[in-house]
Image: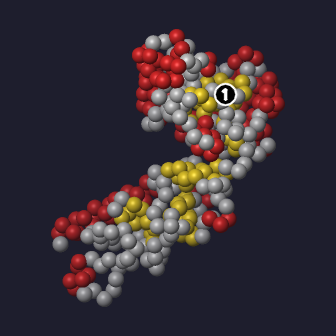
Amino acid sequence: MKRKHGMRTAILLILMSLILSAAEAGTAAGKSTADPQTDPEMTVEAETPAGNGSIAADEKTNAGAESETAAQKATGAAKKEIRTGFQVINGKTYYYSKKGKRVKSKWITVGKGKKKKQYYFNKKGVMLTGKVKTKKVMYYFREDGVLDHTIDRTKKMIALTYDDGPSLYTPIIVKALKKAGGRATFFVVGERVSTYKKQLKQAFDAGCEIGNHSWDHSYLTSLSSASLLRQIERTNEAVEKVTGKTPVILRPPYGSVNSTVRSYAGMPLILWNEDTLDWKTRNTYSTISEVKRCASDGDIILMHDIHKPTANAAAEIIQWLTSEGYQLVTVSELADCRGKMKDGEKYYQFR
Ligand code: NI
């Protein structure tokens, strides 16, 4: 009995920490564009999901059946314990209604307003995490099951990309993105990362993607395979140290690619189909008008966050694209919605 009680305590602790982490997280509560058929059907108060933590310690199966604890069997307890709220069983998270019924194929909403969190439980009742692609919608769930954001696959989308940073101007762009609820991709130069780690972290925390743009902006095509690998690995390590996430896409400096780059990159090679020439004009107005002139669904647009005029163009570009119905997505999200990427392959756009 003592051992069992210990296990129950352990499970209770795990549950409590899960609930606490769910409560803490979620500054960037994404707006759901889920279609009405799958919209949240149940709303519960923030306090209720705690449940009573009464998982039978000897539960081996994840079947829906309620199982009695040994103690209850022994004493012949008349009343069965009912589990409610979030329950972790064999590493999977489930949700039980107030009546103790496992919720299936349903959204669960916890909290209200800015603290609102949405979870989805599939037809087996398992809480979803990570990426989930449906015909119309791309869902991004966090590891704790909270829906982070969605992308409507049937609507227009664009990937704004900013190279050569991070820099002091990066936060100007990030601020504009946050205001519009959009994201972009920053291809960073590894040797700049430690100097501008605060700016890089801000971009990452705003949901932006951080891509690899080599260590020192060398022509990768002029390097030996060993030096090339070192350029990529050092940058990946520098980014990972700041954000906790290793880049999964590479933009070779100058868009310069050969067979060595392709074989050793170890990542998809992201080029662009629209160059705003911001690096040449260094003019806010020209950068804005170039985006307005060329923007089209599935574009990957090239800009540079080391230039102040480019950063100053961000607010209007982002506001205009949003008003035109474009969803501002990262390169990886664009690829999630529109196709697939392979290591060493070049991508210019995703139509
Ligand atoms: Ni560059």
Residue located 48% across and 74% down the image: 97
Residue 16 visible somewhere in the drawing: no
Compared with 25, 87 (above or below) is below
Residue at position x 46%, y 36% from top?
A: 245
**Spot occupied by residue 27 in the image (x, y as percentages of width and height):** 55, 49
Q: What residue is at 59 percent from the left and 62 percent from the top? A: 112
Q: Residue at x 56, y 37 (%)?
A: 341
- For the C terminus, the image quarter is top right
Q: Quadrant of the N terminus?
A: bottom left
Residue 34 % position (x, y): 64, 59
**Residue picked out by circle 1:** 272
The amino acid pointed to by label 1 is: Trp
* Residue at mark 1: C-beta within 8 A of ligand 1: no
Residue 45 higher or lower than 258, as above or below: below
Can residue 298 be seen in the rendering of this structure?
yes
Q: Secondary structure at mark 1?
A: loop
What percent of the width, then of the height, locates residue 115? 56, 57
Q: Is residue 211 above or below residue 61?
A: above
